[in-house]
Amino acid sequence: MHLFFKNRFLLLLTLLVLFLLLPAFFHEGLFVYILISIILTLILIQSMYIAQVHDNRIQLSLIAGLLVLFSIWMDFILPFNQSIVNTISYLMIFAFFIYIVIILLRFLVRNKEVNLDTIYASISIYLLIGILGGFLFTAMYAFNPEAFSFTSLEEKKLLDFIYYSFVTMCTIGYGDIIPVTRETQTISFFMGIIGQLYLAIIVAILVGKYISKPQK
């Protein structure tokens, strides 16, 4: 148990990397969807554990986590597939991981030294922000399929919008997915701003903590 607690941020980071990388090695289909659902569930459980360690609102995190768990597996549980249901599901997942990002940010600010935990947590926050953007864009697309324009005619799914989210955060902009409504355009440029600001601010925080640490 002590080892699990000690490596809680490393485990979260590992799961996030697996969530982003593993689907690339398999063909699109039901297996990939089940795979990302399983990894997302593990990320949820690990996030709930971190929330209970670093936040005293244990019941709130537990209830929210169970609701999100239901949202992750909703497509397998419910016999129908409606855009409004999918939109609510993605927004619930989005809201929960916003809560986790806030907890991780608070840990970074309060931690007085730069160690492996702060490095793991800072990278996890960046990956979570990108994944959060993917869920938000997917929710907007599920609610309004005309919110984006695509160079290909294939139906876009969660992994496509996670890709778009990270491309936007990195300000690369390949142009294969284009926001066409005012709402999606606004969220897109905010994602770009957040991605750049986070890197600048987190580096400043970590460097400041390292410099201010008494040298032995």
Image (spheres, helix red, strand yellow):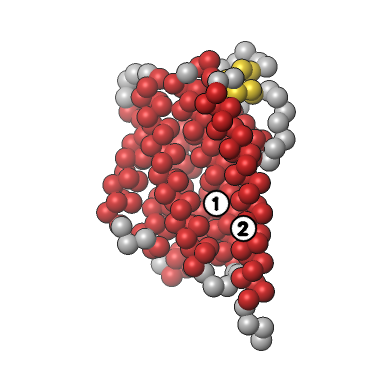
Disc 1 element: helix
Residue that mark 2 sits on:
202
Foreground: 28 or 51? 51
Q: Residue at x 44, y 45 (%)?
A: 97
* Residue 35 visible within the image: no
Q: Residue at x 47, y 18 (%)?
A: 144
- Residue type beneath disc 2: Ile
Q: Vertical placement of 4 versus 92: above or below? A: below
Q: Position of residue 184 (x, y in %)?
A: 55, 26
Q: Nearer the viewer, residue 14 or 105?
A: 105
**In this figure, what is the number of numbered marks?**
2
- The quarter of the rendered structure image containing the N terminus is bottom left
Return the mark for residue 29.
Answer: none
Between discs 2 and 1, the one toward the N terminus: 1
Q: Position of residue 37 (x, y in %)?
A: 46, 36
From the top left corner, tell me how far across and down residue 143 is, in percent.
44, 21
Left/right of residue 88 with respect to residue 178 in the rendered view: left
Mark 1 Cα shell of 10 Å, populated few (<14), some (14-19), many (≥20): many
- Position of the C terminus, as image quadrant, is bottom right
Q: Which residue is mark 1?
A: 125
Give yes or no for contact between labels 2 and 1 (Cβ–Cβ under 8 Å): yes
In the shown orientation, is residue 121 left or right of residue 103? right
**Label 1 amino acid?**
Ile
- The residue at the point 63 percent across, 65 percent down is 206
